Amino acid sequence: HMNIHACTADKGGGMYASSDVIYEDISHMNIHACTAEYAGGLYAEEYVTFGTIGYMDITACTAGFSGGGMYAYNNVIFESMSHINIHACSAGDGGGMYAYTDVTFEMMSHMNITACTAVYKGGGMYLGNIGSMNYQSSTVTSCEATFGGGMYIDTFTITVTD
């Protein structure tokens, strides 16, 4: 288990990953009450690959600009994610999650985003600028934003399966 609590940074209050990093297996991670300008919880940019994420809980994280719970930008790949809970996170855009520019979620199952808020776009998720997501058995509940309370989608491909 990895627990990250009440941490602060400019990018990635809980965790920052950048430039040709590969994480093979994350079996259990909790990020709680972290803050940053970008990504209160998890920040990933520029050719980062996550193999299997078995359980991740991101709660009460805040970003001043984008990605309250999670921020992924520019060639980030999530190969397999299951049992991901993002709860009560907030940001300017993408209260729960912000994914922008070639971000791929190959298999995402049992992801729950609840009670997240964005001032502008994507209370639950902001998905934009060429990316894809295979989304299975997941929910976005009780999220709020000016545009797209649950999801704000712009030039992004989503495949939803039962």
Image (tube, rainbow, N blue to C red):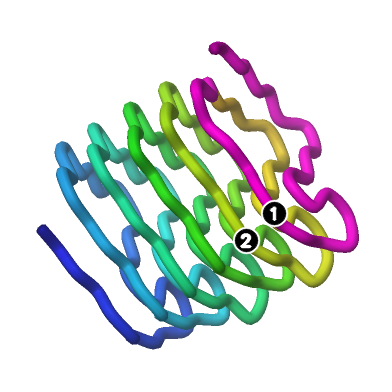
Any magenta on residue 140? yes
Q: Which residue is mark 2?
A: 115
Q: Residue placed at 40% from the left, 61% from the top? A: 58
Q: Which mark is residue 11?
A: none
Quadrant of residue 132 in the image? top right
Left-right relation of 151 to 147: left
Q: Residue placed at 58% from the left, 57% from the top? A: 96
Q: How many numbered discs sit on the rendered protein?
A: 2
Q: Which mark is residue 142?
A: 1
Left-right relation of 114 to 26: right
x, y percentage for residue 28?
18, 50
x, y percentage for residue 23?
20, 44
| Element type at mark 1 | loop
Q: Which amino acid is tagged 1? A: Ser
Q: Residue reaching furthest right? A: 146
Above or below, 35 relative to 43: below
Q: Residues within 10 Å of mark 1 (few under 14, many from 20)?
A: some
- The quadrant the N terminus occupies is bottom left
Above or below, 136 relative to 149: above
First in sequence, mark 2 or 1: give its number. Answer: 2
Quadrant of residue 33 in the image? bottom left
Q: Residue placed at 80% from the left, 71% from the top? A: 119
Q: Which residues are magenta?
A: 134-162
x, y percentage for residue 16?
34, 66
Q: Which amino acid is tagged 2? A: Ala
Above or below, 48 relative to 6: above
Any magenta on residue 83? no
Q: Are marks 2 and 1 in contact (CB under 8 Å)?
A: yes
